Amino acid sequence: MSIEDGIDFAIIELFFFAYRDFTSDPDQILADYGFGRAHHRVLHFVNRRPGLTVAELLDVLKITKQSLARVLKQLIDTDHVVQLQGPRDRRQRELYPTAKGRALALALARPQSRRIRAALEDSGATERALVERFLEAMVNPELRAQIDVGSAKMSGKSHGEH
């Protein structure tokens, strides 16, 4: 362990390298579409939480409306995401992946899932639970409620499959 001035550089560097490799496969796929990591994040959450409102997505991603607008417009214009008026509040805009958007979201997640599976392969359920607890603890406490893994709302269905 390399702790200097109270800074754990070893873990920080492991995070840098892990993140670099975790994002490298999706980055290559995204480049074919002229998309970037912002598109990936939007597609991920729209696919995992169909019907997510624009306001909810802004809250999850912690980005400005202006930053989201450009990315969302591209995803809508390329038929990866559809935006519908909310049934209860017409001012709300709900987001759904199209079949094309869902296919891309899955294509982006597959290599990441393979990488995670390979890293956890020699670990048992106890180690996996430890990794999940560690990653959850890395999220700001006031934002942990946004972690919704396995919820019913995360059906991952595309628009038209409800």
Image (cartoon, grey):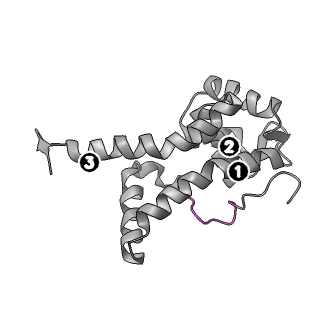
Q: Is residue 107 left or right of residue 118?
A: right
Decide which of 119, 50 is in the foreground and name it: 119
Q: CA distance from mark 1 to mark 3?
A: 31 Å
Looking at the picture, which amino acid does disc 2 mark? Leu
How far apart are the two marked residues, 1 and 2, measured between alpha carbons? Answer: 6 Å
Q: Which residues are magenta?
A: 148-154
**Amino acid residing under circle 1:** Asn
Whether the residues at callouts 1 and 2 have beta carbons within 8 Å, the answer is: yes
Query: Which of the 4 quarters of the picture holds residue 162?
Result: bottom right
Return the residue at label 1. Answer: 47
Can residue 98 be seen in the rendering of this structure?
A: no
Q: Which-is-in-front pick, marks 1 and 3?
A: 3
Give the side of residue 10 with respect to residue 56, left or right: left
Quadrant of the rendered structure where residue 61 is? top right
Residue 25, compared with residue 137, is above or below; it is: above
**Label 3 sits on residue:** 11
- The residue closer to the viewer here, 10 or 59, is 10
Q: Measured from the top left, where is residue 57 in percent x and y? A: 64, 41
Q: Marks 3 and 2: in contact by CB < 8 Å?
A: no
- Image x and y of residue 47, in percent: 70, 51
* Residue annotated with mark 2: 43
Going 43% across and 40% down the picture, which residue do you hit?
20
C-alpha separation, residue under disc 2 versus residue under disc 3: 29 Å
Name the spot of residue 155 as percent of width and height, x first: 72, 62
Determine the residue located farthest toward the left in the rendered image. 5
